[in-house]
Image (cartoon, helix red, strand yellow):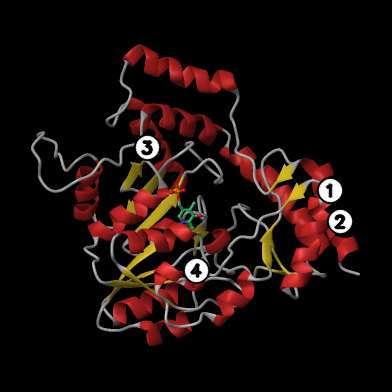
Amino acid sequence: MIFVTKPFLPDISKYQKYLERIYESRWLTNNGPLVKELNARLCDYLGVSNLVLVNNGTMALTLAYRLLGLNKSAITTPFTFVATTSSLCWHNIRPKFSDIDANTFNINPALLGEAVDDEVEAIIPVHVFGNACDIGNIEKIAAKNNLKTIYDASHAFGVSYKDKSILSYGDVSTLSFHATKLFHTIEGGALVINNDELYEKAVRMVDFGYDDDNSIAEIGTNAKMSEFHAAMGLAVLDDIDGIIGRRKEISDYYEAELSTRYRLQEKNPESSMNYSYFPVVFESEQELLDAMDRLNSNRIYPRRYFYPSLDTIEYTNSNKCMAISRAIADKIFCLPLYDDIGMDNARSIVEILKDNNL
Ligand SMILES: *Cc1c(COP(=O)(O)O)cnc(C)c1O
């Protein structure tokens, strides 16, 4: 069976080398040597500073809200994984949806102005499928309206925008290192914070509010990454260039074979790609369902990312229909794409899809 994704597992002996270090030190969690090493190597690889490792990507988002003092409302996209929105609702911050661009699937800066009201404190865009948002225009609208920006960069590991890390824009960017993501620590995530004081505050908040002198400086929580999770991250990071290279090969093949028949995501020309997802847009939901059936009967399981459009979920209390997001959500899925999917499987998938589109 071929699923939309399959977690990458490093060579077990490599993972074991890192685990042996934990057994020797008996330092299992609380900012141990492997977490420190992973942090330093990620800063180097991603080209950022002020990175804080945490236990998952949802926690990274909620820490960002807390760090920037959000408590009323934030503008966000209806076309994303549910965590971007549910984390807001969980903290009683009202999500205010603003529709996406039909071609890039990212929040449309031209519509943001309409969504601003007295309660809105921030804009929370997502770099959907690793494709950079129109950061320049989002930042302009944020500055004009005195709003914070938090980029959910869960899909954008290693992506650069205008020749520097995509994580260096806005107030905070968040990453998810969940097992299904391009780079992972089984469960995990990070914040990248573009302000030194807020960075120091985040470091304390992750560990119950303790500061360097072991006094409790403020309200904190427990968002720490363990040494075992960091060990997986270090082992995966050793292989990351190969992982991205193999995904690129499959993505390039899909693109060459499918771009004349199907609508694919329009890439931001100033963004690099990390080949984390391969979305395909159909003419209609029926055409999508037919393609799913055909693939499923060959034991191939693409996934409807992102479905449904989040403005249709009752608890979001959205009073405005996000027409473009709904239209895209109804007819998009992501093709299987993972490290060892292999060219033979990719060829079968392409053949089945082409047959389907008579
Ligand atoms: C995966 C994901 C998250 C949540 O990350 P977890 O590590 O699973 O908590 C948030 N936003 C987006 C866009 C994601 O894809």
- Badge 2 or badge 3: first in the primary sequence: 3
Front position among marks 3 and 4: 4
Residue on which the image places disc 4: 310
Distance between the Cα atoms at labels 2 and 4?
30 Å
Which circle's residue, 3 or 4, is located before the other in the chain? 3
Q: Are marks 2 and 3 in contact (CB under 8 Å)?
A: no
At which x and y percent is residue 276? 60, 52
Q: Quadrant of residue 137?
A: bottom left
Is the CB of the residue bearing disc 4 within 8 angstroms of ligand 1?
Answer: no
20 sits left or right of 5 in the view: left
The amino acid beneath tag 4 is Leu
Residue bearing mark 2: 352
3D distance between C-alphas at marks 1 and 2: 9 Å
- Name which of mark 1 and mark 2 comes first in the sequence: 1
Q: Secondary structure at mark 3?
A: helix
In this view of the protein, can residue 152 be seen by the observer? no
Is 208 placed left or right of 275 in the picture? left
Q: Is residue 70 above or below residue 227?
A: below
The quarter of the rendered structure image containing the N terminus is top right
Return the x and y of residue 128 as percentages of the image width and height: 54, 63
Choose the circle earlier in sequence order: 2 or 4: 4
Label 1–label 2 contact, CB within 8 A: yes
The part of the image, by quadrant, that contains residue 131 is bottom right
Name the element at disc 2: helix
Q: Judge from the rendering whether residue 87 lies leftward or rightward of residue 103; answer left or right.
A: left
Cα separation between marks 4 and 1 = 30 Å
Mark 3 lies on residue: 40
Sequence-first tag of 4 and 1: 1
Q: Name the residue at 59% across, 53% down.
A: 274
